[in-house]
Image (spheres, rainbow, N blue to C red):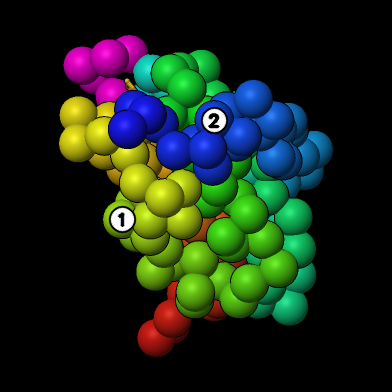
Amino acid sequence: MALYSEKVMDHFRNPRNVGVIENADGIGEVGNAKCGDIMKMYLKIDDDCISDVKFETFGCGSAIASSSMATELIKGRPVHEAMQLTNKAVAEALDGLPDYKMHCSVLAEEAIQSALEDYYQKHPEKRPGA
Ligand code: FES
């Protein structure tokens, strides 16, 4: 069996939503201290929906594939759904990652959480329960 699924290879070779959003509503940057990889997410939010999302990842192929898939999973979705995106869901959508590469999908979850936190800090009135 191949180490990486076709979906991982596809998103690694042709990552979706790469880039920067000028005047993003939320920006999150996270890194993994062990491997040194860094992921940055930009969110545009309109009417409590993720109207656009872009990422920059300086990291391994699994991190690039995870960021790409994560952006696809939250684009056009309500903010509260994006909040609940887990690394497990990202890995499943990629038809799996090798165990020792699961931490790469964690970066995608954390980058989105961090971008949403940035958004809520700028717009505290939007925070659930505020
Ligand atoms: Fe660190 Fe993939 S090896 S994110």
| Amino acid at the residue labelled 2 | Met
Say whether residue 31 is visible.
Answer: yes
**Farthest front residue?**
1
- Residue at the (67%, 61%) spot, across then down: 75
The residue lying toward the viewer, choosing from 25 and 68, is 68
How far from the left and from the top, in percent, is residue 99? 19, 36
Considering only vertical position in the picture, is 13 above or below 83?
A: above
The residue lying toward the viewer, choosing from 130 and 89, is 89
- Which SS class for mark 1? helix
Residue 59 is left or right of residue 86, and the answer is right
Residue indicated by mark 1: 88
Distance CA(mark 1)–CA(mark 2)? 18 Å
Residue indicated by mark 2: 9
Q: Residues within 10 Å of mark 2 (few under 14, many from 20)?
A: some
Q: Residues within 10 Å of mark 1 (few under 14, many from 20)?
A: some
Give the magenta-colored segment's residue range. Answer: 32-36
Query: Cβ(mark 2) to ligand 1 < 8 Å?
Result: no
Point out the image quarter for the N terminus: top left
